[in-house]
Image (cartoon, coloured by chain):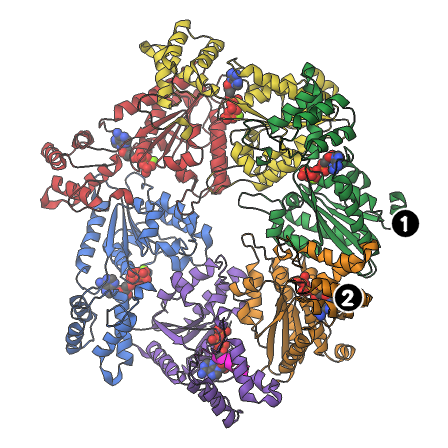
Chain colours: A blue, B purple, C orange, D green, E red, F yellow
Amino acid sequence: DFNYAFQNDIKPAFGVKDQVLQQFLANGIVNWGHTERLLSDGMDLANTAKNGKRTHLVTALLEGATGAGKSALAAKIAMDAQCPCVRLINPQALIDHGEAGKCQAIVRAFEEAHKSSQSVVVVDNIERLLDYNPIGPRFSNAVCQTLLVQLRVNPPKGRRCLVLATSSNKDVLRQMGLLGCFDKMLHVPTLRSNTHVAQALKGLGGVDERDISQISSDIGSRELSLPIKRMIHVAGVAETTCGSKGFASKFISLLEEDESLAGAGSKFSRSNF
Amino acid sequence: DFNYAFQNDIKPAFGVKDQVLQQFLANGIVNWGHTERLLSDGMDLANTAKNGKRTHLVTALLEGATGAGKSALAAKIAMDAQCPCVRLINPQALIDHGEAGKCQAIVRAFEEAHKSSQSVVVVDNIERLLDYNPIGPRFSNAVCQTLLVQLRVNPPKGRRCLVLATSSNKDVLRQMGLLGCFDKMLHVPTLRSNTHVAQALKGLGGVDERDISQISSDIGSRELSLPIKRMIHVAGVAETTCGSKGFASKFISLLEEDESLAGAGSKFSRSNF
Amino acid sequence: DFNYAFQNDIKPAFGVKDQVLQQFLANGIVNWGHTERLLSDGMDLANTAKNGKRTHLVTALLEGATGAGKSALAAKIAMDAQCPCVRLINPQALIDHGEAGKCQAIVRAFEEAHKSSQSVVVVDNIERLLDYNPIGPRFSNAVCQTLLVQLRVNPPKGRRCLVLATSSNKDVLRQMGLLGCFDKMLHVPTLRSNTHVAQALKGLGGVDERDISQISSDIGSRELSLPIKRMIHVAGVAETTCGSKGFASKFISLLEEDESLAGAGSKFSRSNF
Amino acid sequence: DFNYAFQNDIKPAFGVKDQVLQQFLANGIVNWGHTERLLSDGMDLANTAKNGKRTHLVTALLEGATGAGKSALAAKIAMDAQCPCVRLINPQALIDHGEAGKCQAIVRAFEEAHKSSQSVVVVDNIERLLDYNPIGPRFSNAVCQTLLVQLRVNPPKGRRCLVLATSSNKDVLRQMGLLGCFDKMLHVPTLRSNTHVAQALKGLGGVDERDISQISSDIGSRELSLPIKRMIHVAGVAETTCGSKGFASKFISLLEEDESLAGAGSKFSRSNF
Amino acid sequence: DFNYAFQNDIKPAFGVKDQVLQQFLANGIVNWGHTERLLSDGMDLANTAKNGKRTHLVTALLEGATGAGKSALAAKIAMDAQCPCVRLINPQALIDHGEAGKCQAIVRAFEEAHKSSQSVVVVDNIERLLDYNPIGPRFSNAVCQTLLVQLRVNPPKGRRCLVLATSSNKDVLRQMGLLGCFDKMLHVPTLRSNTHVAQALKGLGGVDERDISQISSDIGSRELSLPIKRMIHVAGVAETTCGSKGFASKFISLLEEDESLAGAGSKFSRSNF
Amino acid sequence: DFNYAFQNDIKPAFGVKDQVLQQFLANGIVNWGHTERLLSDGMDLANTAKNGKRTHLVTALLEGATGAGKSALAAKIAMDAQCPCVRLINPQALIDHGEAGKCQAIVRAFEEAHKSSQSVVVVDNIERLLDYNPIGPRFSNAVCQTLLVQLRVNPPKGRRCLVLATSSNKDVLRQMGLLGCFDKMLHVPTLRSNTHVAQALKGLGGVDERDISQISSDIGSRELSLPIKRMIHVAGVAETTCGSKGFASKFISLLEEDESLAGAGSKFSRSNF
Ligand SMILES: Nc1ncnc2c1ncn2[C@@H]1O[C@H](COP(=O)(O)OP(=O)(O)OP(=O)(O)O)[C@@H](O)[C@H]1O
Ligand SMILES: Nc1ncnc2c1ncn2[C@@H]1O[C@H](COP(=O)(O)OP(=O)(O)OP(=O)(O)O)[C@@H](O)[C@H]1O
Ligand SMILES: Nc1ncnc2c1ncn2[C@@H]1O[C@H](COP(=O)(O)OP(=O)(O)OP(=O)(O)O)[C@@H](O)[C@H]1O
Ligand SMILES: Nc1ncnc2c1ncn2[C@@H]1O[C@H](COP(=O)(O)OP(=O)(O)OP(=O)(O)O)[C@@H](O)[C@H]1O
Ligand SMILES: Nc1ncnc2c1ncn2[C@@H]1O[C@H](COP(=O)(O)OP(=O)(O)OP(=O)(O)O)[C@@H](O)[C@H]1O
Ligand SMILES: Nc1ncnc2c1ncn2[C@@H]1O[C@H](COP(=O)(O)OP(=O)(O)OP(=O)(O)O)[C@@H](O)[C@H]1O
Ligand SMILES: [Mg+2]
Ligand SMILES: [Mg+2]
Ligand SMILES: [Mg+2]
Ligand SMILES: [Mg+2]
Ligand SMILES: [Mg+2]
Ligand SMILES: [Mg+2]
């Protein structure tokens, strides 16, 4: 386990602490259809990295819509991999570090990881690490170059490393040549059907069975694209503000307002945001 | 109340003082049709943030035309939410702080808010915070990235936070991906009919009933798009300069000159400004 | 009067001295048709700012062609307003101050004005303040943002302020969103007819009645667009160089050469400069 | 005269010394058709500036092709104006001064000029002062803004100033709004006919009458556009390298090679350089 | 041998150590069809550089797809050339050196090489050295200019030098004029047929003969473009994760997923990454 | 001679030493058809500069393809001119000097040259001096402006100066206005026919007469564009690697591979590099 690891391997000098990855899992992992497959793919990656005869470095990208659950899944896989060293490169923690500080943090995280026999490096939210802005576009080329180089640095002889990165902007990464740095692409989907929603609400807990049934039938076969994080938020708002109208109908009307759920007359989808 | 809050919670180290938010309400809140609904939506947001089981962070954007009343409404909601800690991020106060200073002020305001059990953060006039200029366009990407990250930082366990931002440039925010950071969009409309104007003038006080009637009938069903702030200014100018012509006709002619009010031969609307 | 003001109100720490505004009036104000109306509109603005119940801040832009007389009129109105504090933001005085220095000067001028019960702030030649160059275009976004914010800062309770700005590039100001910061637009026209020229030459003094008659008939109904400043210059050149040809015909031929005055075969107008 | 001036007026602290302007006249002023008219126009400008009742500042631009003689003519007019103070703003002398240094030099030259009762400021080769490069285009906006402001600064009461600027890139100056800063435009033409060339060669001296006749007849009515500076250079090369071929035919063949002179089969003109 | 060289020639002050070049050969050189020809071409280059009467400097570029084996082949040729001095310019080692640091490292590597009677300079991954990013595009022009100059600097009299550079972005190098700096271009191809794959898997070792046969027949005449580095990785993943499905079919399905191998319904090729 | 010059004139404080110009002539000057004419044109330039009555400054540009022999010819002419002072502005020597350092070096070289009664300034490889990169394009405008000014600075009275510059990018120089700074353009061509090649190989020495004959007949009337520097390199490679195939056929096949020599099926020419 982690405690054991920290005591018997190297000490984390920078970056991830167990609780930071835990924070990514604030709402746990609710099973809703694609979850199991994604976690099993993640375990395959971890196995290949830890035990492969010819593969001492495995790099994977979890990509999908905003709120699809990329960071949560990366954290879960990183923790389940049970490596003695886990390093997180986290834009939130690097917010006032500037371009050079970010580059340094990336280099250092990999250096530390490479000192351990087995390590996981989580590179969360690459587009924020890059300070990417579609207007221009603007971004930090220094951070980009650092990633382009670091993602291909082999760990020293006898060391093994799994890299898990997340991004909601696959196209930009492709244009920058960053996609070519990953051995594996894992797409993290949004909830697309009433079955997905029903399963997720059940897993979430605290929602009445009848509400779930009604929601499921209200959605029916209408078009839906709902990130899990958004679903949890909407459920929260519905709870607080439904009053006498009832949870189910408030939940549905919030989705429609959001345009996650196609309704009559809806013109713009939330994905336009 | 606020005094209680300040004594029993944390001390405001930076930013908002009660009177700054008060300044946003220099002309009070006059009821003119959409006002009640907007304030009630605001209270729902506050409730969800303060009491929601699953929602510890709620972020909302008040957007609408220049002078529509966005800052005044944000201030009103922030004060009515009765949270022990309120922080204001105010471009006027940050005018000579430079890019780095603005980023720091943003980070610090959120950090302080997150130290309180319940907080409101008002981010006023995002496009000014961004130093946005449509020619180029130019803007501070550093400020933008800081907002993109900060607007999604969850308060620590057990803490709750409501974020209220204002902007009159929704399109730019969408392009930069900032819209996706908000849980809720509140559109603040302009006055569009003679009823709106009559109601607002009545609420404003000091205007003769007959003048209001005449203005109402002069507007009739002509097209109108008048921000509340502009209406108050125009009423002020009319008062001072109407002389013998009478308030009502001066008021109407100022609106026509302004092109807030469609008249014969009007070619350019003030919105072109 | 001014002396009184300076002794009984605050002392001018920076910027305008009475004589600088006087310099803008080097050639006085000659009455030529639109002058009276413009000055009376200016007085209305001053009245509204000084006495309006609801209007403690009034901002106006005097815009028109190069040399149309914008700065002179702004100076005249500012002095006639008889406020105890007048502040001038003058690109000529800020020429070697750099971007930051200009921003500071702007902020300071407003701060000082806001300390007085009644103040006028003259912001002369906004495009020069912005270091605007149509090639690129290039300009100081920092100065632009400072103006965008400062032009909307309300004076503190009980204080009143009139802002008079000048510009010959209204389009650029519109694009930057600066037009929306002004409560009132005052267009300063050029001389367009022989009547205008005759009236102005008469007012100028020292020109023979017969010359004026001849000039008036020479212009006849030809198209004309002549800024007052240019007219005064052309009259000066004609005086010095007419020799025996006579003032009137030299004056006319200079206008034609200038292409202020449409003539046979004229292809480019001076406004192309 | 100059000596008198320097002793009885102010001392030149910076910039022009008599001999620098003299250098611009290394090859003197040869009379070739347009020369007299240009010099007389220059004297008119000087008179207007020095004696005009209403004109205390006169600004003129000498513009024309590279080598057309702009700097030489500006120097001649400046010296003939017989003002106690002459200041030269010279890109060659400012080559390693950087943007800020150039701006300062400009401001200082005008300041010094304005201390004298009568002054001439020569602003040579504006496009070099601007570091103008058509690729981009690139240029110093700071220098441009300084010129835009300085060219309009009135000398203090009782002082008079003539500004003579030169440029071979009128279009760029127009785009930047610099043309509008000049009261007068003087076009400096190239030699366009055999008469021009014959007259200039005669004035130059040391060329055989028969050679001049032959050159004149060789040019005949062919198209020609030859800057005076180039003509002097070509005459020099012809002298040194003609050998037995004779001066005239060498001179003509050099012009053809140059494509200043239209010949059979010439496709590109030197002006394409 | 190397040891001898280091003892009797100059000491490596910077850059390559034998083991770094060794790292480029982590997976050895497996013979798969084009390998021999490439190595023999490399030896020709080395001979020409070391023994040519008129050729004291030979510069070659190994270019090809990502993972095609460019760095490995350059390292092999550099070591086989048996020169007393080998210098490596390696973007991985220069990651935090900045633009100036990279330029200096390049200059110094060449300077050191030129001190030896015979030297090899390996310039690995030019596009990373240039910090090249296709968005913009952005790159370090300083590094580019340094290469443009250094690649043409002749070693001093009596010294000889072989330069081996690698790049996967030939087009960009051509646009920048860098291609013109190379005497020779060596294209490093990907595996294009089942024969190539069979030969490479055999050389790799540890793969069952029957699996190789099956893979070869599965590929058949389908279109294939597989870099050797990717093939080795895919073999590694197949080994670890094939389970009972068998190595061959897992290997094939990974290639199809990768889109290195054309399959039914494949729309995007990995080269789009 | 040079020694005499250095002892009796000024000492070279910076830049060229005799041996650096000698380095440009590492392979001597082989006579191959256009060589004599170019050298004689060069001597004419030197004569005009040294003895012309009206021409104290002569500036010439040697332009042509990469490797055409521009630098070698400039060096030869500079040395043959027998001036007491020769200055070289050499991008290779200025590689780590930065923009400002390059400008300074240029200014200083001219200053030193102008101290001598007769001087030659060689400005080698202008596009490298400018750090020119076609992507963007990017270049140092400061260096460009310095050249634009310096190339026109007349030496002081009684001093004489010849400037020889080289460039393989005439178009860029024209766009920047640099071409207009040269009195004379000398085009340095590539070898275009079998006669050229035969003559050059003969001059080079060490190549068998029969090989030359065979090469000449192999080329026949095929299209050819071969810079002299490339020809010497190709001859060197052919010598070292021809083995039993024979020099001539190896030489021809290298030219074909290079695409300097049109062959069946050749699609891209080396000039595309
Ligand atoms: N099956 C699931 N997969 C992923 N996340 C889940 C799942 N079930 C519940 N969650 C919760 O949903 C949230 C997903 O948010 P997360 O921040 O991981 O999304 P994201 O895709 O990284 O968003 P962003 O694009 O903003 O970075 C987390 O709070 C997580 O605890
Ligand atoms: N119903 C109302 N809603 C909003 N503001 C009101 C209302 N009634 C009166 N007001 C007054 O109208 C003014 C609205 O101005 P405010 O600065 O809030 O507008 P804004 O939309 O933020 O403008 P800007 O785009 O310039 O930031 C305030 O002075 C406020 O006191
Ligand atoms: N009726 C008038 N209106 C304005 N100016 C007048 C009038 N009569 C005379 N003048 C004189 O005309 C000149 C107008 O010049 P002024 O600098 O004010 O023009 P401007 O429009 O500000 O020019 P610029 O675009 O260059 O700033 C002043 O010298 C002023 O004294
Ligand atoms: N009539 C003339 N007009 C102008 N210059 C003449 C005349 N006769 C002879 N010259 C000589 O011709 C040369 C003109 O060169 P000058 O440098 O003045 O041209 P320019 O137009 O300023 O060139 P550039 O565009 O390079 O600045 C001078 O050496 C001057 O002495
Ligand atoms: N025949 C071969 N040619 C080249 N490399 C081979 C060969 N056989 C095995 N390899 C191995 O394949 C790998 C090739 O990877 P290498 O890094 O050299 O590729 P690359 O083209 O430089 O990739 P990149 O574009 O990422 O720089 C090395 O690990 C090398 O040991
Ligand atoms: N007739 C000749 N003309 C020029 N150079 C020759 C001639 N004969 C032999 N050479 C040799 O050819 C080489 C020409 O190379 P040089 O560097 O001068 O070309 P370049 O055009 O300056 O190339 P670059 O474009 O790379 O600067 C020199 O080594 C020179 O000694
Ligand atoms: Mg995430
Ligand atoms: Mg607001
Ligand atoms: Mg003005
Ligand atoms: Mg000149
Ligand atoms: Mg490589
Ligand atoms: Mg060269």
Q: Is mark 1 on a helix, strand or loop?
A: helix
Q: What element carries label 2?
A: helix
Quadrant position of ligand 5: top left
Quadrant (top left/top right/bottom left/bottom right) for the N terminus of chain D: top right
Q: Where is residue D101 in the image (x, y as percent from the top left)?
A: 68, 48
Q: Tags 2 and 1 in contact by the CB under 8 Å rule?
A: no
* Circle 1: residue type: Asn
Residue projecting furthest to the top: F209
Magenta span of residues: B223-234
Label 1 CA crowd tier, 10 Å (few <14, some 14–19, many 20+): few
The residue to which callout 2 is attached is C212
Task: Indicate the chain on which mark 1 is placed.
Answer: D
> Which of the two marks, 2 or 1, is nearer to us in this view?
2
Q: Where is residue A220 in the image (x, y as percent from the top left)?
A: 16, 70
Q: Where is residue F52 in the image (x, y as percent from the top left)?
A: 72, 22
Circle on res. D8: 1
Residue in front for this viewpoint, F101 or B73: B73
Residue in front for this viewpoint, E177 or D183: D183
